[in-house]
Amino acid sequence: MKWHEILLRHRVKTAIFLVSLAVLGWWVYLHQDELTREAITEFGKQLPAVWFVAFFLILPLAGFPVSIFLVLAGIRFGFVWGMVISSVAMFFHNFAAYRLTHGLFRCRLRGFLERAGYGIPPIDVRHRVRFTALFAAIHGPPYIAKLYLLALTDIPFRIYFWVGSPVYILFCAIPVGVGSAVTQFDATWIYVIIGILAILSLAGYWIRNRLPVSPN
């Protein structure tokens, strides 16, 4: 089954999604003058800590952009505590996504991919650690897609959790640092962020060169 056929079968959900997206875009357009750095900073500072953490744990698993929470964590809690909270969230997301994918949703997700003409390839045992690290490190696919798609493979939980989570945490340092720098500008953060980007780029290049083209 092709993508256009799937969209036709789910035309009501597709229409709701498109209308919601259009409404959100229109709202952002109308309030673009109000979405200043000062307004966002003030909003981040006033967020109740308990509700923020609860939303951070739950909403990214439903598809809400995790980058927004990371930046707000830096604004609301500063770099150190923002990274602590983000690390807890990353571990929780990986744990919950794996359990959900290997529980009630596994058959539904695999069935959806099969109907769309896609399969889940097996991952060679020798390359599972490097493949997990690379898959978590690549930019492009949404965070939620990477969590659930990797969990659908035959990679065991110990690798999925203990390799994937630390990689996601490493990449949290950039948006959390940016959020922290918004409230208290310090040139040191610029150097730190540049250094982290350089290290992550070199690490990704090294992993990519050591990983075979095909995981089979």
Image (spheres, rainbow, N blue to C red):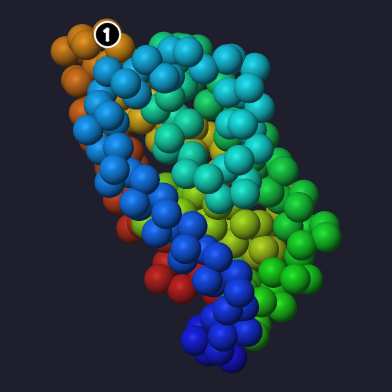
* 199 displayed left or right of 54: left
Between 207 and 13, the one nearer to me in the picture: 13
Where is residue 76 shown, x and y percent of the image? 45, 15
Name the foreground residue: 163 vs 23.
23
What residue is shown at x 43% (from left), y 35% (from top)?
A: 68
SS at circle 1: loop
What type is the residue that disc 1 sits on? Gln
Q: Residue at x 48, y 31 (%)?
A: 69
Task: Work out whether 126 lies above or below 93.
Answer: below
Q: Which of 68/165 is in front?
A: 68
Q: Look at the image and tell me whether residue 177 can be seen.
A: no
Q: Residue furthest left?
A: 187
Instruction: Farthest residue to the right: give it.
Output: 104
Name which quarter of the figure residue 89 lies in.
Answer: top right
Please provide percent x and percent y for residue 31: 30, 37
Q: Furthest-front residue in view? A: 30
**Residue 178, how many percent across, how many down?**
30, 24
Label 1, residues with CA under 10 Å away: few <14, some 14-19, many ≥20: few
Residue 179 x %, y %: 34, 22
User: Going by the image, does 17 lie left or right of 115?
Assistant: left
Q: Residue at x 75, y 71 (%)?
A: 108
Query: If the image is split into quadrants, where does the N terminus sit?
Result: bottom right
Q: How many marks?
A: 1
The residue lying at 34 percent from left, 18 percent from top is: 41
Q: Let me know if residue 178 appears in the view.
A: yes
- Residue topped by disc 1: 184
Q: Is residue 207 above or below residue 154?
A: above
